[in-house]
Every structure is written in C-alpha cells, then in structure tokens.
Amino acid sequence: MAVTPPEYSSETRAALRTIVAEYGPEALSRPTTMSNLLKDLLPDAPRVARMLVAAAEDHIADALRDYVSQGMDAATAARLTASLFAGATMFSPQACAWVVGEMAIAIGLLPTAAGTPTVTNPPESGSAVPTGRPAARSTFRPAAGPARAANVGAIAYIACENDNSVTPVDLLTGVAGAPIRTGNWSRAIAVTPDHAKAYVTNYGDGTLTPIAISSGTPGLPIKAGNGPIAIAITPDGMTAYVANEGDGTVTPVSLASGVPGAPISTGKRPYAIAITPDGATAYVANEGDGTVTPISPASGRLGVADAAGAPVAVGNGPVAIAITPDGTTAYVANHGDGTVTPISLATGTTGTPIAVGRRPVAIAITPDGTTAYVANHGDGTVTPIRLAPPARAAAPRLVPDSPITVGKRPWAIAITGDGKVAYVANHGDGTITPVNLASGVPGAPIAVRKRPWAIAFIG
C-alpha cells in the first residue's frame, strides 16, 4: 500500500529542505509555522501537509535530534520515533514511518538514499526497553480505529506521589511527555470507556481532575470528599465513584455535568473500589475495618440515594480489589496479612484466603479472566494466581504460581487490553517494569518520575 502519491514525494522532500534552509530545523516542530508554509509549498497535497503538521505538533523532529544527541544512531532513532508517532496519531504506521524518514533526511540525520524506517513492535520477553528519553513532547494523542488497536496499552498516564501531576509515557520507547497539572497529591487514575477523558483523584485537596486525552488539557477540578484515594467509572461512562479515605465515604460524580452527588457511607478508611462489568454494583475495600462494602447505584441518576449493602469481612487491611470479567468473583488484596480473599458476588460469601507476597497492594486480572496478578509492595514481586472456574471460585484453595521479581516497592499494576503484558509501577525506584505474561519474564525497567503511584492506559 502506497504511503503517499509518488508525484508528491519529491515535492515534499523539497518543501522540507526549503523550510529547514530558510527557517532552521526548529521550524519542523512549530505547527503554526508548518501549516502556513505548507499552504504555499504543497498546495496540491493537503493530506501530506496534515501529516507534516501533526508531526510538528508531536515534536517529531525534536525527538529525532534528541535521540541522536544522546548517542543513538540515526537509523535506530528513526525507528523509535516512527513507533512513537504511529502510537500517537490517527495515521497508519507506514505513513508515520514515511514522514519520520523525510524529516530525518531534511535535518541531515539520514542520507537521501535511506529507506523508510520501520515501526518497531512491543518488546518480547526479556528484550530491553529503551529508557533514554528526548525532551518532553507537548502532547500524546491516542490513535483511532485499527492503528490504536495495534498499539493497545502503548501510552499510559503515570501519577507520582507528591508530584501534583500525571505524566504521559510511551511504554514501548520510554519517552515521556510534558507533565499535566492536577490537584495536590494525585493518587488514582481512571479512564472513560471511550478513552476520551481521564479522571485523577487528588488526595491533598479533595478534588477530581478531568483531563481531555486528545489534547492533554486538564479541566476544572470537581469536589469529592476528604482524601480521595481511588476511583472507578461505570461501564456506560456516565458516573465515577470516588472512594474518600479521610471521611469513610464514596462520592458519585456525574461525568456529563461534573456534579458530585450525595456521599455514600462505607466502612472505615475506604481504599479501593471496583465496579462489576454490568455496572450493577460497586465494591469498596475498607482498609480500616477489613471489610468490603457493596454499593448499588441508583439507576445512574444522581440525587437518588445509592444503596450501601451489608459489609463482607475479608482479611487484614484490604487495599485493592479486582472483579473478574464475567462479574462472578471479586479478589481482594489484604495488605496486612499477605493474602488475597475471593468473594462470590452472587452469594457474598468468601473463599479460602490465598497466600501471596509481603504486603500486597495492587491486583489486576487478565481480560480472559484466567489469572490475577498481585503486586507485593513488601518484597518487590508480582504473584500470579490461576483463577478457578466461576462455579467454584469461592470454594477451592487456589495456589499461587512462583513470584516474578520486579522493581523496588511496587505499588500499582495494569494489564494491556490484549492480555499480553503487565506494567508494574515501582514506587521505590521510579521505574515501570513490563512483564511478558506468556512467559512470566520481566523486561528492562522503564525510568519514569520519582515514586510512581498509579498507572492507567490512555492509548
């Protein structure tokens, strides 16, 4: 499939050379300048002009130069930058590779005879993930349609303790974008089902920050409760439920209006929340009293009282909860006693606790529902648990697999939509560890900002 009509290839190369010669290589990263110049230089190639302006918006030429300035060879820099661009735009990977190649030629990094750079794939197990990063780009924009599906889980927001921001990071290249300002002490991130917005809980000021993912622009803060520590969004994308550790409540928020509803009382120190796939019930893990509180949303309408059900006793210090994709079972990580408690959601009964590592703090379940992965803060590991069939979920004694060593003091874990890779945020050493779930082998750590606390995929 042709990347661009052949009759415009030479014109495009000539246009880029003219821009660099007359305005310098920096002009290639100025969207307004590029748009104005290309109207005259490429009047008959509007599609090519749009791709070049998009590359300017994502600072592709700057990324190329910064990679090379760090000692990377030009061909490798072009391949990585092509992957970065393909994961952040609506254009095909082939088109992105062609644009990157032409920009590399224009600024003198590649010879004229160089071929189009290839787009790199996600790392296989044990392969290195580059951790060097160029200067921060202004935005990351998730691709739409098939291109996005091919790069699922490639870009994530990372919240770091006491940072008052979230940072977009391309997990395939280790390249970070500019931090996005939130409220004080960002603690948790949830993304709407359509990937249009992310919502960040701010523990220090009791607010929720909405972020438009396409632009990386934060919106006005939404008032929650005291010490919002966790958030979950209903499958229809209409309502967010925010767990407030400081006052023992959950705040429902209408995402259409940004208006919070009446707080719902839970157990002591609610710390985590998950919603069933059908949106019928939210389950809140209460660290302070070792219980899980079920909440039945009132038809998604704020102003109508949501109903909290009878609490379910679990282990000591529950701080994380995940629900299987079929909605039959919740698994609760108990920080205080190093276990995971299964709960049959049909009956509200608990199963035999599963021993994991020291001080488990996060849990994620694969999309096919076969395995849970538990991040253990106390010993720097992730414990895989092969889950039982739904009919027996709360009855049998589940036996965990061998732990996987990750970074120092892991605090969060997220699994890609295709179920192939888990990414573990390591609070103690400022890294993200990718884990190939087919082999259980961790890849090279990706350096991020200090003390990462939460991770959520945005594209």
Image (cartoon, helix red, strand yellow):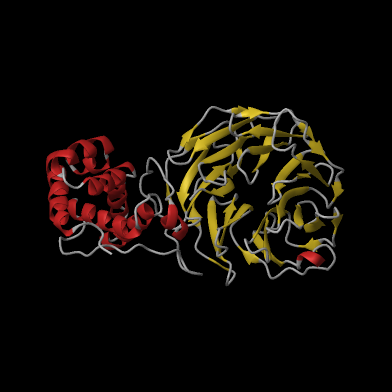
The residue depicted at 57 percent of the width and 72 percent of the height is: 439
- Looking at the picture, does residue 403 appear above or below residue 428? below
Task: State whether residue 131 appears in this view.
Answer: no
Quarter of the image with the N terminus is: bottom left
Q: Residue furthest front?
A: 299
Image coordinates for residue 337, horizontal then vertical, percent: 81, 55
Asked whether 149 or 360 is in front, the reply is 149
The residue depicted at 53 percent of the width and 53 percent of the height is: 431
Image coordinates for residue 208, horizontal then vertical, percent: 60, 33
Left or right position of 202 against 333: left
Asked whether 178 or 370 is in front, the reply is 370
- Looking at the picture, does residue 250 appear above or below residue 70? above
Asked whether 165 or 240 is in front, the reply is 240
Image coordinates for residue 262, horizontal then vertical, percent: 74, 28
- Looking at the picture, does residue 161 appear above or below residue 337? above
Q: Residue 207 sits in which quadrant? A: top right
Q: Residue furthest bottom?
A: 439
Left or right position of 170 against 359: left
The residue depicted at 82 percent of the width and 39 percent of the height is: 308
Q: Residue 376 sits in which quadrant? A: bottom right
